[in-house]
Amino acid sequence: MQNHHSNSNLTTDRPTFVTHLECGLEGDRYESDVIQELSKAGRPLLVKYDLEGIAAAITKEELASRPADLWRYREFLPVRKTENIVSLGEIQTPLIPLSKLQTGSGELLVKDEGRLPTGSFKARGLCLAVCMAKELGIDKIAMPTNGNAGAALAAYATRADISTYVFCPDDTPEINVREIAAQGAKVWRVNGLINDCGKIVGQGKEPMGWFDLSTLKEPYRIEGKKTMGLELADQLGWKVPDVIFYPTGGGTGLIGMWKAFNELKEMGWLQGKLPRMVAVQASGCAPIVKAWQEGTRHAELWQDAHTVAAGIRVPVAAGDFLILDAVRESDGFAIAVDDDAIIAAGEEVSQKEGFLMCPEGAATYAAYQQSLANGTVSPEQSAVLYNCATGLKYELPRADQTLDCTKPIDYSSL
Amino acid sequence: MQNHHSNSNLTTDRPTFVTHLECGLEGDRYESDVIQELSKAGRPLLVKYDLEGIAAAITKEELASRPADLWRYREFLPVRKTENIVSLGEIQTPLIPLSKLQTGSGELLVKDEGRLPTGSFKARGLCLAVCMAKELGIDKIAMPTNGNAGAALAAYATRADISTYVFCPDDTPEINVREIAAQGAKVWRVNGLINDCGKIVGQGKEPMGWFDLSTLKEPYRIEGKKTMGLELADQLGWKVPDVIFYPTGGGTGLIGMWKAFNELKEMGWLQGKLPRMVAVQASGCAPIVKAWQEGTRHAELWQDAHTVAAGIRVPVAAGDFLILDAVRESDGFAIAVDDDAIIAAGEEVSQKEGFLMCPEGAATYAAYQQSLANGTVSPEQSAVLYNCATGLKYELPRADQTLDCTKPIDYSSL
């Protein structure tokens, strides 16, 4: 089976183009290829590339000839050495048309991120973060999680032989806690919220020798999430949709996609208007929506956060200003949908299109409907919704019809 | 977003090459393009193609330039009209190396079928069956299921606006019953086994106007499963592994893959020895293993079938002789593994490789280990294991470590 490996994105060395890191807020410069956490300003670091170098090194045609996975975009990613790639099969996720729910000429597509390893888009960010941890010699990682991120971390870190300590609130979905443990991480249920878990990680860094992999506290999860944007443009023939609806908790994906589109534009690979970026939140936890409405650059901590879409129950995001910048620069907006609308949206998509979304994905369809209704988006505009995880990880309504096969069946009653 | 559709496998018309159908046992000929069920001998019908025509119509290079999904192989499939394609994003499933568990020079890969729509390989067969039902004007489908097949049917049939009636034993996993209902099918829990459900379907055909989509009772589920073989050869650069371990219940996939390899060989696209096909069953339900050991062409009904791997709890398979033919022609074998070995195999793969298998997938790794131990397979031979569904649909062990964040953390205890 030599051909598998010789043609594979996973074993072919490629040139890399990272030049340095930069504070997302202040723009000051940091060295790459050494362990970095937050900037001096306490803000996320962004990875900078020699984009001209990338443009000179590859063509769209060459990209198209490579296997359809995340590693197709190797030149846009920070991993220097092929041997540090840790992979569980990061396939290109499909774009699924919701033709029956489309009301105008604008195509309505879902990008189904539930097909990634461990069943969620968290795989993109954690895959890159773990590859870079391996490249930088890190051997112990700790992280607070509401569920899916911990599952992705456990899988990749185990594969990379890195020890992992995961802390989650005790109301984290049972399936997530179990998959984290099954995939070789140490996991604890904590009688508190995600910020309490974050404190346990922060205070344990010193005595335990942990590297802190909390959202945006290291530079590489954004680079993984960036591939959602690279992949979308690639799948659409290096074009972009008019609008993107993205379920926004920590917002790493929205930040990453916007970074991707701008890198592609700077390289000349995308022309014209970039997509309007829409940050979708739940009415019970909408700090970004509030900040967008009030025109502030940072978001306040949201009190008493609650929603059925637990993945976007994030009261405060370290990258709030990066989310808000992307929304504003792209002529997008932030929108909140309530739990009833989220549940109804999920049911409509699965009952009509046969496609089961996660609650956070369903929130994007609810937001799309609401935006059509209030005129902020037109049915003639093309739209992409992000379904960030498989619907199979979430509680579905019971279905209790029974039939007694020991008696004659009354078919007219079926 | 015009480029999405103009480049897509889903909207590009392609020539088709079906010539007729043929009884898998007797070889007598049946017309294609009309509704067909079993042959006169009561056996599965196989779809026959003008393979020279396919070889003249496409090249491996052209295939490589198409998007990496099931519809890349359009010329090898029975759907005539593009408008009848019903798709939920049937991506090419990844091959994941189990490098840490490999003991010799022979590469050990898992094909992760859990990435398909509805989380299992059943999507391949049901997708094709539903497309053909649509093409042939069928508007009501009924099916007995142990779970995953019903979920795949529900999703595709809803998308195709075909009414669906699904009957499952009342010990079917809760998640399957719920996803069947959520995806728009009518579903009943029946106080019996899969054969009792099958009887309800059989007796209801006439009064209800149902088409019976039971395993191998129509010709097209095999064609969908055939793509597992086409895809594997394609991914390996038109080479094949030495051995394939396949979890075998009804065996549609094993039959389909063997059909694929032989079609490719006849076209000259594969040279040399085809893979040894290994039918993996559970010790508590091993009719194919018994028939293989005893040298019979058909398998007897297995009494008191039981195993943790419910997907291969199939006491009698309509295509038993096709499974046994493939195993024998390929110089393969049939092997049974017990539940303890299945559970231990699953734990070993997830704890060491970070990859969560379903119980049926874990059975293939148990069988691989057992085959290395008894010398029927050598560690120098390359092997592919089929993980037929996402591990997330199955009960995982509890993980109950807790931590009290209201008190100082004793890090030395972690």
Image: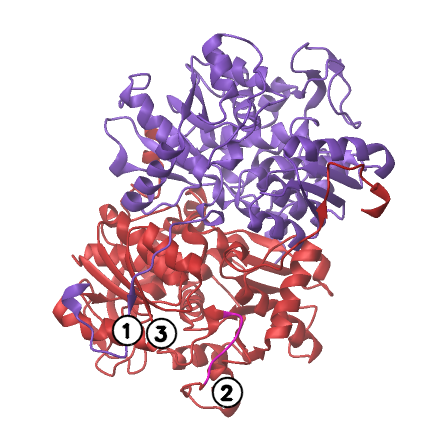
Chain colours: A purple, B red
Residue B21 percent location from the top left of the image: 25, 70
Residue A404 - label: 1
Residue at 40% from the left image edge and 51% from the top image edge: B70
Q: Which residue is mark 3?
A: B194
Q: Main secondary structure of the magenta part?
A: loop
Q: Are marks 2 and 3 on the same chain?
A: yes
Is A368 in the magenta?
A: no
Determine whether label 2 and label 1 are within 8 Å by CB. no
Q: Are marks 2 and 1 on the same chain?
A: no
A200 relative to B109, above or below = above
Q: Which residues are magenta?
A: B304-309
A359 relative to A287, above or below = below
Residue B77 seen: no
Name the kind of residue labelled 3 in the image.
Ile
Q: Which residue is mark 2?
A: B290
Q: Nearer the viewer, mark 2 or mark 3?
A: 3
From the viewer's perspective, tell me whether residue B57 is left or right of residue A313: left
Which of the chains bears the disc numbered 1? A
Residue at 43% from the left image edge and 63% from the top image edge: B264
Residue A210 percent location from the top left of the image: 80, 37
Crowding at mark 1 (Cα within 10 Å: few <14, some 14-19, many 20+): few
